[in-house]
Image (cartoon, rainbow, N blue to C red):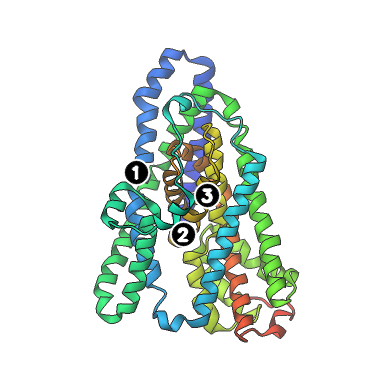
């Protein structure tokens, strides 16, 4: 699986480079008539096939993955204090993560200076609803209609309630849950199928942009990458380190010194799921968290706690809005916070899922999906950083909850580093 993902990543990078080179050659040496025909008959259709393939999966993936994730928590009564505390931590830190992402994106404006040809004529911003209507309208009066219309907030709320209800029903609902899990697994495979054409889609979309705009459009893209990395580092050190120190009085430096090997694994694999075993082992052996806590909080966190992904979604949404000259007001940005926070529950640790969730956020606030092409082209760099932040948040939350429950061995935490088996 990792080799396959690495191969796909390599292909996307190669496609990006070839697309840039091809676009530069076309922009500099080919006639406008030839370029227009190439865009109309080849590049635009190929790029749109990829974009529509992503959009095709948004609604069913959100529905089934959230139902499956919510139901997998187990008996609601057994969640007790640990479940309530860790879920409150996960949702609160994710909301805070996307909030600081939006704050920095508003301040630095990474999308300013990137303008796509024809964007002003083709794209209009969706007017945000009254702020209190955002909350009341989260509850769907007709879930089927919400799915048809692609109303993501309503789909998310319905899916979470449905998943919790399946858990409450218990044994008699397991056949239905098995069907939902199989549907979710099938959709994950569909993501893999769509992502197999990602190199071609990236080549077509990037070539299209560079042919139309030239090299000037590419240089500001690094502003987006550096901003996402910067906000993730701030969240990793200041927010996580601050929460650890505030709630446990433990030294954050000790944590990072002992947790560094897990972060390296996450950085290299870009998969939260792949890090679960080493994360649990490190929390138990090096950080003193009881197995009864980590066996619940770490796997759950790999599913629902995606602070790094939420940061990427927040920065990317404003980056794309600024790139298309769309002004997102306070209510629209509040919508991004809500959608990105709730969507983090359904952002699975598989290749391409984060891009699908980003398309959901863009769709909810009326932003064009075409902007995903630029974001995807540098997503591998961002993916490594955000995965590292995601799994670190799981460990910090586990320590905080274990400490509050008296299931934290502080002597182990403060002991010298041991090597993992």
Q: Quadrant of residue 205?
A: top left
Element type where label 3 sits in the image = helix
Residue drawn at the location 60% of the way across and 60% of the way down: 389
Q: Which mark is residue 342?
A: 2
Task: Give the percent coordinates (x, y) of residue 177.
Answer: 29, 71
CA–CA distance in space, label 2 to label 1: 23 Å
Q: Nearer the viewer, residue 197 or 181?
A: 181
Around disc 2, counting alpha carbons within 10 Å, would you say few (fewer than 14), some (14 to 19), or many (20 or more)?
many
Q: Is residue 315 visible?
A: yes
Around disc 3, counting alpha carbons within 10 Å, would you say few (fewer than 14), some (14 to 19), or many (20 or more)?
many
Q: Quadrant of residue 34?
A: top left
Labels 3 and 1: the sequence-earlier one: 1
Residue drawn at the location 72% of the way across and 72% of the way down: 245
Around disc 1, counting alpha carbons within 10 Å, would you say few (fewer than 14), some (14 to 19), or many (20 or more)?
some
Residue 121 left/right relative to 393: left
- Which residue carries the number 1 mark? 53
Residue drawn at the location 49% of the way across and 51% of the way down: 131
Residue drawn at the location 48% of the way across and 65% of the way down: 304
- Disc nearest the viewer among 3 and 1: 3
Above or below — where is 285 with respect to 164? below
> Does the CB distance between marks 2 and 3 fall below 8 Å?
no
- Which residue carries the number 3 mark? 313
- Disc nearest the viewer among 2 and 1: 2
Q: Which mark is residue 219?
A: none
- Disc nearest the viewer among 2 and 3: 2
Image quadrant in which the C terminus is located: bottom right
CA–CA distance in space, label 2 to label 3: 12 Å
Above or below — where is 242 with respect to 354? below
Above or below — where is 186 with respect to 110? below
Labels 2 and 3: the sequence-earlier one: 3
């Amino acid at each position: 699986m990792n080799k396959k993902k690495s191969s796909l990543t390599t292909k996307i990078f190669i496609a990006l480079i070839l697309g840039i080179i091809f676009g530069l050659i076309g922009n500099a040496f080919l006639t406008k008539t030839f370029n227009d025909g190439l865009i109309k008959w080849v590049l635009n259709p190929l790029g749109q096939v990829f974009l529509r393939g992503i959009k095709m999966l948004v609604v069913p993936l959100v529905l089934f993955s959230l139902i499956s994730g919510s139901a997998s928590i187990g008996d609601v009564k057994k969640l007790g204090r640990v479940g309530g505390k860790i879920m409150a931590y996960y949702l609160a830190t994710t909301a805070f993560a996307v909030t600081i992402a939006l704050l920095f994106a508003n301040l630095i404006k990474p999308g300013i200076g990137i303008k796509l040809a024809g964007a002003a004529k083709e794209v209009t911003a969706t007017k945000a609803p009254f702020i209190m209507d955002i909350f009341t309208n989260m509850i769907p009066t007709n879930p089927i209609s919400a799915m048809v219309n692609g109303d993501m907030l309503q789909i998310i709320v319905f899916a979470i309630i449905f998943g919790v209800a399946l858990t409450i029903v218990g044994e008699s609902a397991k056949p239905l849950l098995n069907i939902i899990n199989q549907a979710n697994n099938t959709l994950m495979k569909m993501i893999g199928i769509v992502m197999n054409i990602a190199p071609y889609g990236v080549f077509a979309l990037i070539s299209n942009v560079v042919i139309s705009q030239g090299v000037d459009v590419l240089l500001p893209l690094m502003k987006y990458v550096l901003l996402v990395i910067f906000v993730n580092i701030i969240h990793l050190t200041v927010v996580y380190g601050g929460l650890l120190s505030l709630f446990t009085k433990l030294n954050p430096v000790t944590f990072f010194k002992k947790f560094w090997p897990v972060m390296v694994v996450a950085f290299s694999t870009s998969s939260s799921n792949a890090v679960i075993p080493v994360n649990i082992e490190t929390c138990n052996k090096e950080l003193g968290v009881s197995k009864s806590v980590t066996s619940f909080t770490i796997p759950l966190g790999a599913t629902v706690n995606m602070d790094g992904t939420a940061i990427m979604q927040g920065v990317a949404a404003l980056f794309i809005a600024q790139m298309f000259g769309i002004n997102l007001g306070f209510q629209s940005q509040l919508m991004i916070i809500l959608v990105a926070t709730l969507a983090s529950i359904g952002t699975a640790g598989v290749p391409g899922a984060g891009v699908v969730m980003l398309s959901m956020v863009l769709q909810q606030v009326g932003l064009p999906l075409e902007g995903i092409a630029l974001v995807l082209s540098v997503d591998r760099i961002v993916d490594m950083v955000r995965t590292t932040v995601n799994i670190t948040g799981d460990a910090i939350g586990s320590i905080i909850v274990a400490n509050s429950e008296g299931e934290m061995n502080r002597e182990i935490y403060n002991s010298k580093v041991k090597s993992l088996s």
